[in-house]
Amino acid sequence: MLGRTVDAIRIGVATGIVVGVVGLSFVSAAGAEPIQADDPEFSPTIEWTFCDEEPIDACEPGYGAGENPRLDIVVEQDEGERDFSDLKVRFPSGYYLAPDGAIADGSLLGSADVEIGSGPGCAGGEGKAPFTAEDLSVREQGRTEKEIKRGVKSVWVIEVLPNSNIVLKTFGSRSRGIKIDHIIPANDFLCPPLRVEVNYQAQSEDGAAIFRNPEAPGTYTFKALFVSEGDDPMLQRRAQEVTIGN
């Protein structure tokens, strides 16, 4: 993922089933209240770095008011931790994320690298080896009628493997804040350690701005949530303030 020394947003998180808004009650599918804790069993982290559009081969901090930055995201998890089944993040009001109609279906948005443990050892058997996939495509995907009715504003896909893609669905608006639901397919033969780096371009393949900073200078708060697998999910929430403009 990121090997750069930059002005970054760091959000460390752990579990819960959510709609992405802090203050909601998070309940598992089985109805159990997730446990919130800093626990070595479940302590994934996420790092966000906004970079100027140029230069491409380096990261100059991109926090200017109204700027159209690149965005690098890194998610990491240590060996032996619980898998996570859900990740939801919230961009504060004022941030722009391109809606479905702004980007042509199938347009390239960026790339991703994935490193994760794999093998029977992840499912209680013996033997585990690292699985690595580099330069995976991140693309815009057209919404279905069902997604439109549910209020999904855009769908982005990290193309990992057939039937194993990570799907991102966005909700909300620039004025109310954007929520992003990461749909992560279950796979008993994949488990931590985990490292995923996603590098979003400033513009999509067809030239549309993907992200845009708020027009008003000020302090903005990002929030993130992971949810672990299991009947007793664990919850940990983190928030990070970011200063836009001078």
Image: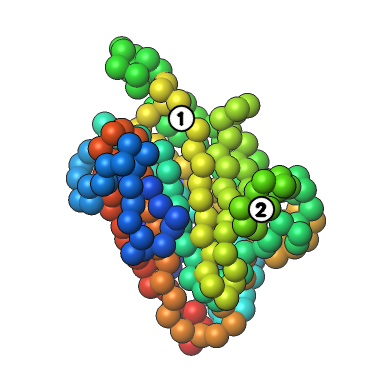
Q: Nearer the viewer, residue 232 or 11?
A: 232
Q: Name the residue under label 1.
A: 186
Q: How far apart are marks 2 and 1 (CA)?
A: 26 Å
> Colour scheme of this structure image?
rainbow
Label located before the other in sequence (2 or 1): 2
* CA neighbours of label 1 inside 10 A, class few (<14), some (14 to 19), many (20+): few
Residue 228 makes an appearance in the image: no
Residue at (31, 33) in percent of width and height: 230
Horizontally, is 52 left or right of 207 in the view? left
Residue 63 picture location, percent across and down:
52, 74
Horizontally, is 154 left or right of 230 in the view? right
Q: Name the residue under label 2.
A: 149
Which numbered tag is attached to residue 197? none
Residue 214 makes an appearance in the image: yes
Residue at (34, 19) in percent of width and height: 123
> Which residue occupies the extreme top position in the image?
126
Up-down relation of residue 20 to residue 54 (above or below): above
Residue 219 picture location, percent across and down:
42, 80
Residue 167 picture location, percent across and down:
58, 42
Judging from the image, what secondary structure is the residue with disc 1 in? loop
Residue at (33, 36) in percent of width and height: 30
Q: Nearer the viewer, residue 115 or 60?
A: 115
Judging from the image, what secondary structure is the residue with disc 2 in? helix
Q: Which of marks 2 and 1 is in front?
A: 2
